[in-house]
Image: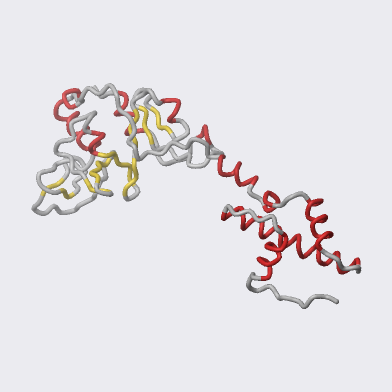
Amino acid sequence: MKPAWLDALYAEKFFVGCPYHETAKKNEKNVCCLDCCISLCPHCVPSHRYHRLLQVRRYVYHDVIRLEDLQKLIDCSNVQAYTINSAKVVFIKKRPQNRQFKGAGNYCTSCDRSLQEPFIHCSLGCKVEFAMKRYRDITPFIKPCHTLTLGPDYIIPQDLHADDHMAAYETPRSTVVDGDDSVSWSSTSSELGDAATTTHVVRKKRTGFCFCAKSANSYKVVSEDPDDISNSINRRKGIPQRSPLC
């Protein structure tokens, strides 16, 4: 007999979109709940946080599991492991390899894949198939495991819309003071009699004030002196300086 989680691990599809979180970001299913025997995405994990959870990874377009995690569930002896990011992993499903002629060497008992000594199985599925054919039972290889949690490197999204929510408020208008204050400051600082000239000065200073306020917010330096703001505008590169109007 095989445990239900072993059949689910072999039958479930991973790294596909979660149907319950179609519109959410990072909704690929990469966790297997051993108690519910289903595949989960990062958004589903909090609902199963008290269950035994096994993370599934991807290697050369195949599903793999860390050897350290899999050894807590089943005996992985004689199964060849591969190294990914300094961690050993084991393939879940067997990978058949057609060979017309076999040379001298070590081959998998189920899929005839060339292996290193002394391994005789290239994946978890190959070992389970071999044990079922030879012993008619996989129970002697199953280990008791009552708790299994995800590793510290697994990231569960807390609020994926937080960035979008904050970005909605990070607009150029957020760093601009009220329009009345800008007009009053510009009108008082200008002693020119011509209305057209005053309008031009107001538009120029309001544009410069928006830039300076945003720059001051970025560097956390606030300047309320109109002369400092005007000087900072003149120091900007690429902006032509006009002679004062008479």
Quadrant for the C terminus in the image: bottom right
Residue 235, compared with residue 77, is above or below; it is below
Residue 133, compared with residue 205, is above or below; it is above
Q: Nearer the viewer, residue 246 or 100?
A: 246
Residue in the picture at 71% in, 63% down: 227
Asked where in the image residue 238 lies, by quadrant, the reply is: bottom right
Q: Horizontal and vertical percent for residue 136?
A: 18, 25
The image's colouring method is: secondary structure
Residue 69, compared with residue 61, is above or below; it is above
Quadrant for the N terminus in the image: top left
Q: Nearer the viewer, residue 114 or 100?
A: 114
Marker count (numbered): 0
* Left or right of 183 on screen, residue 109: left
Q: Horizontal and vertical percent for residue 64?
A: 30, 41
* Left or right of 3 on screen, residue 242: right
Residue in the picture at 72% in, 75% down: 241
Q: Horizontal and vertical percent for residue 3?
A: 27, 23
Residue in the picture at 62% in, 56% down: 216
Q: Horizontal and vertical percent for residue 169?
A: 65, 45
Q: Nearer the viewer, residue 121 or 239?
A: 239
Asked where in the image residue 228 lies, by quadrant, the reply is: bottom right
* Left or right of 12 on screen, residue 117: left
